[in-house]
Image (tube, rainbow, N blue to C red):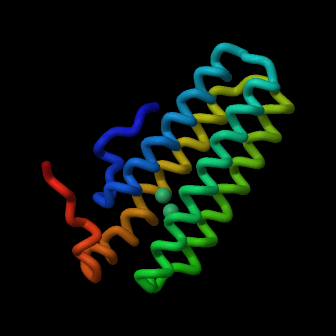
Amino acid sequence: MKWNSSLAIGIEVIDNQHKQIFEHLLALENSVAKRDPWHILRFLLSQLAEYMKFHLAVEEAMLEIVRYPDHADHRQAHARIMEQIAELEEKLQKTGSGTNLVAFFEDWFIRHVLTEDREYAAYIKEEFPALFARVKA
Ligand SMILES: [Fe+2]
Ligand SMILES: [Fe+2]
C-alpha cells in the first residue's frame, strides 16, 4: 500500500522516511505478485532492510537527544522489526511466493508507526514543540 496522511506522526523528516519505507514495501509487493525470481526479491529486500536500518538509527538518535523515557523499549521494538525483515527474507526464499507475507509485515510496521512512533511524537510535541514547527512557504 501507499503511505497516506492517516499514518502521519507530525514530524516532517520522519513522515518522509516512513513514506520511503512504504515505497520499498510496494515495490516488493508488486515484485512478489509478479512472481519475480528470487535474486530480484532479494535485491528489493536488501534495499528495504538498508533503508529501514537508516530510518531506525535516525529515530533512535533523535529519541536519545530528546531523552525519551521509553527509549530502551523503542529500541527493542526496532530490533524486532529488523528480525521480522530477516524472517520475511527467509520465508520468501523458501516459498518463492507470498504477497500475504509482505502484507503481514506491512501491517506490523503500520502498527509500530501508529502506536510506538505516535507515542514518542506526543512526547516530543509536549517537550520540544519547536521540532514540530514546519517551514511554511
Ligand atoms: Fe518510524
Ligand atoms: Fe520507531
Quick check: 3 left or right of 129? right
- Left or right of 89, for residue 60: left
Q: x and y percent of residue 112 in the render? A: 49, 57
In the figure, residue 29 lies in which quadrant? top right
Residue 107 screen position, x and y as percent: 52, 44
Q: In this view, does 63 lie above or below 78?
A: below
Q: In the rendered image, which quarter is residue 99 located in?
A: top right
Task: Report the residue at 82% width, 27% height from top.
Answer: 95
When the figure is inspected, residue 29 is found, relative to residue 122, above or below; the finding is above
Q: How many marks?
A: 0
Q: What's the residue at 38%, 56% (across, down)?
A: 13
Q: Residue at x 60, y 51 (%)?
A: 52
In front: 110, or 125? 125
Q: Position of residue 19 (x, y in %)?
A: 43, 42
Q: Give the x, y percent position of residue 11.
A: 32, 60
Q: What residue is drawn where x is 39% and y is 71%? A: 120
Residue 86 vs residue 39, the one in the foreground: 39
| Closer to us: 20 or 71 | 20
Q: Is residue 60 above or below residue 29?
A: below
Q: In this view, does 32 lie to the left or right of 117?
A: right
